[in-house]
Amino acid sequence: MNNANNIFLANESAGDPTRDRGALQTLLLATAVTVLLWFVPYASAVTYPLRLLGTFIHEGGHALAALATGGTVREIEVYADGSGVTYALGGSAFATIWAGYLGATLYGALLIALVRRGTSGRTLLVATGALIGVLTLLFTRNLFGFGWGAALAAALVLLGLRLAPRAADWAAAFLGVQCALNALFDLRTLLFLSSRQPAATTDAVLMSGILPLPPVVWAVVWTALSLALLWLAARPRARRRRAAA
């Protein structure tokens, strides 16, 4: 009597190939719109709220890292030029400083990866709105930052609740691309300041006070790690072939 055991290796995504293609198309469309906006006059007025959102994510990374390592957060301030500052006491200074630029990139990469894996865009929008809302209510003290934080949180939650599923998926992908690219633009600025104005107070300068490497070295390290995170989130997903024995 012949006994045969058949072994089937599932696709890495464990999902529907059609859904995977749809998620990738959504991501590509969101990226195309983001790039197109660079060439549209006055488009900065449209992307300005997203610029501030990136600042909240950056400063939130500092705050969460400080809390996670036993510190406390006194306040977060977000300014009209898109800059921000987090005042924290205690905790790991190393982790707190690293969590700014890398935290912003990681959040954008995470949104991209989750959209590609079929996570509901509505859920991602509501979760992002809730995160901004918590950071605003608990830590943001300056009037400009508090007002914009509350507005961004409300808008994201409303979009998550009201948008159709496909529209929400696209919005979440667009948000992820914007967060990631804004983080890279900020790192580009950091590279410039670290090489041309090393006396400017930046995260790289603060990091140099902990580990004595030139600020430009830290800027290069963070940029390289950010690019690696984005590659991991957006890389083509390998598929395993079915095998039988």
Image (cartoon, grey):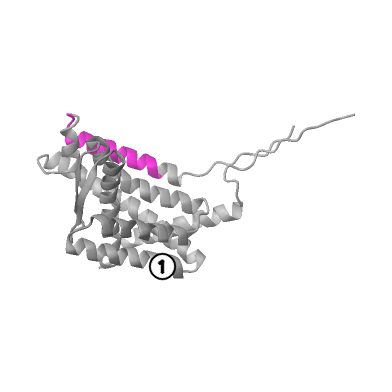
Identify residue for label 1: 159
Q: Give the image quarter of residue 31.
A: bottom left
Q: Which residues are magenta?
A: 212-230
- Residues packed near mark 1 inside 10 Å, few (<14), some (14 to 19) or many (20 plus): some
Q: Give the image quarter of residue 52.
A: bottom left
Query: Which residue lies at the image location 29% right of the left edge and 41% below the top edge?
Result: 223
Query: Which residue lies at the image location 17% right of the left edge and 29% below the top edge?
Result: 212
Q: Position of residue 92 (x, y in %)?
A: 25, 36
Q: Is residue 166 above or below residue 18?
A: below
- 160 vs 116, nearest the viewer: 160
Q: Position of residue 170 (x, y in %)?
A: 45, 61
- Relative to 11, is 232 on the left or the right? left
- Relative to 143, is 175 on the left or the right? right
Q: Give the image quarter of residue 209.
A: top left
Query: Which residue lies at the image location 58% right of the left edge and 42% below the top edge?
Result: 12
Q: Position of residue 146 (x, y in %)?
A: 23, 62
Q: Is residue 2 above or below residue 14?
A: above
Answer whether residue 91 is magenta in the image: no
Q: Is residue 94 above or below residue 234?
A: above
Q: Position of residue 70 (x, y in %)?
A: 27, 39
Which residue is the extreme one toward the left? Answer: 199
The image shows a total of numbered marks equal to 1
Query: Which residue lies at the image location 29% right of the left edge and 42% below the top edge?
Result: 65
Kind of residue at badge 1: Leu
State whether the magenta stretch is mostly helix, strand or loop: helix
User: Split into 4 quadrants, where in the image is the N terminus?
Assistant: top right
User: Split into 4 quadrants, where in the image is the C terminus?
Assistant: top right
Which residue is the extreme one toward the right? Answer: 1
Secondary structure beneath label 1: helix
